[in-house]
Image (cartoon, rainbow, N blue to C red):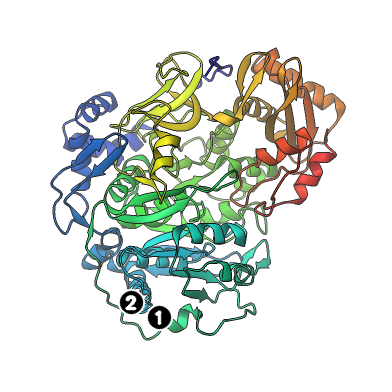
Amino acid sequence: MSNELDALLKENRLFQPSDDLIEKSNIQKWMKHHEITDYDELLERAGNDPEWFWDELARELEWFQPYKNILKWDSPHAEWFSGGKFNITHNALDRHIKTWRKNKVAYIWEGESGQVKKLTYYDLYRKVNQMANALRGLGVKKGDRVAIYLPMILELPIAMLACAKIGALHSVVFSGFWSKAFQERANDAQVKVAITVDGFYRRGQIIPLKENVDMVLDDIPSLEKLIVVQHAKCPVQMKSGRDLWWDEIIQDQERECATEIMDAEDPLFILYTSGTTGKPKGVLHVHGGYAVGVYATLKLVFDLKDKDIWWCAADIGWITGHSYIVYAPLLMGATSVMYEGAPDYPDPDRLWKMIENYGVNVFYTAPTTIRLFMKHGEKWPQKHDLTSLRLLGSVGEPINPEAWMWYHKHVGNRQCPIMDTWWQTETGMHLITPLPITSLKPGSAFKPFPTIKADVVDDNGKSISEGGGHLVIRTPWPAMFRTLYKDPERYVDAYWSTFPGLYLSGDVARIDQEGYFWIQGREDDVLNIAGHRISAAEVESALVSHVKVAEAAVVGKPDPVKGEEICSFVTLKEGFNPTPRLKHLLREHVRQEIGPIASPAYIGFVEDLPKTRSGKIMRRVIKAKVEGNDVGDISTLANPEAVDGLDHAL
């Protein structure tokens, strides 16, 4: 970067885990077993011998044939556990059926309407086998691609595991995307079979997914069959010879199915990045290294125990759901909660009620969800007994310190450490994260996971100790993506060519004097104000730290003198109203929190900010509005009406 990103916010509050939590943690027991005395020694030993570290964890999984090499690294191409024979579904299901976990609950599923279903490991095993047999019966074989376009229903993990069992690659498309996005991804992957649903529930309304997808199926030439789950029982048109009901194709299938023995480096799935700009990138993950990486991080970061109830409140359509709703929890033999609907429907205490009902012990969600609940107020979590919680987690974007504090105080009762995890679709697993034994600073993702060497560099690739810069990773890791599907040149160009030998994350970060990493957002979220490079995330964080503000979105508006001016949109907490005086107070608040250079030139009050159905604020749309440009396709927004609200705010 031409100028160092100005790191203007300072956060010095420190939170320590309890002695009891440390003593009982999986990481503490793991270190004792390996005669490691403390966290620093763990980092040193793992850093000096990463192959030892990953070999120890890989041995906790079941291999049909042992691997010959732990790592072959020819930058930017990695092979982990080569020579090993493996299948992730065998490790997620088959091996548990031979143990006491056979009748343990794997998933507690709750529909938006309150319907509850529970599946044991044995239930799940048999359902996966039936779908695997059905797919084989349709001609799906090892290496074929299957598109899965399903909401948060149990058939989604069943379909993924069935594909993996027979060696087919699944490509899950988030159910909140419109059908054109599905078509684009299905064509890129040249899928043979697709799986969808008649409809699903969102805020009490039925979303007719089959009806939507019908509009594009004729434009997917590789598609032979469409499997349809009956869920909402809404009317659909079934095309003879192409469309098949899920229940009908599995009803006569055997409940046993031979598992395909895979090479550790055989592909497991393709997951496309959101594609809000440009062609979506088909991120390719493999069976062996991905399994080891997600298993290790769930075990050591989130400290899951056999009796725990785990809830990752993400959507399986994203990498968080792939890694920490489907694969890692099942690899660990854990019990997971899975929820179909909106987090605040029909009331803002929906999640807190479910935590109380199921006795959830470890809860993982996104900062945008936390800010949503901040807006509703602490009275909603206070209605429920949340004392079953032991650990909390954050994922998806940087969490601002005030949201961290609210989460810690009102959800965690000041007792639960927050594992603020940084990672990406491409990384597959947590790379920068606390552990249950480490000291926490609100808003910091802490430090790299053992063996991971992360750094912050300037435009010349030189490490910088002050200010912000490009976040890079210097070392390979097991769950790293292997390439971009059918686009190996883009894999190299987009991630490995800017600084040869270093993985370019596309995020901006800084490292403080104690070595804590502070993720400041995407590189394209950096504002250039009168020659100063200021993180939009830091300005947003300063605004949200005001007692009356629930959420904020900040973009740059071109200015002939300064280069850009700061333009902010703000939603207020319940009980507060927008006034000209409040605009003035917020500008002064940002001046006090960061400095005069970061004070917004424009502040607009809105009822809601435009967001994707996964809850991410669509800054691209906001920036287009501010600049007077066409906002483009907004069909993926959860609340397109919020776009019109921007016009009245400035």
Residue at (33, 65) in percent of width and height: 104
The type of residue carrying mark 2 is Asn
| Along the viewing direction, whichever of 535 and 330 lies nearer the viewer | 535
Q: Is residue 569 left or right of residue 97?
A: right
10 Å crowding of disc 1: few (<14), some (14-19), many (20+):
some
Residue 174 in view of the camera:
no
Examine the image and state in which quarter residue 342 appears.
Answer: bottom right
**Which residue is under mark 2?**
133
Disc 2 versus disc 1: distance between alpha carbons? 8 Å
Answer left or right for 32 relative to 609. Answer: left
Q: Name the mark on residue 250.
A: 1
Mark 2 residue element: helix
Spot occupied by residue 326 in the image (x, y as percentages of width and height): 40, 57
Looking at marks 2 and 1 on the same chain, the residue that comes earlier in the sequence is marked by 2
Dot 2: few (<14), some (14–19), or many (≥20) neighbours within 10 Å? Answer: many
Q: Is residue 552 above or below residue 106?
A: above
In the figure, 556 relative to 390: above or below?
Answer: above
Pick the residue in front: 125 or 621. Answer: 621
User: What's the residue type where badge 1 is placed?
Assistant: Ile
SS state under label 1: helix
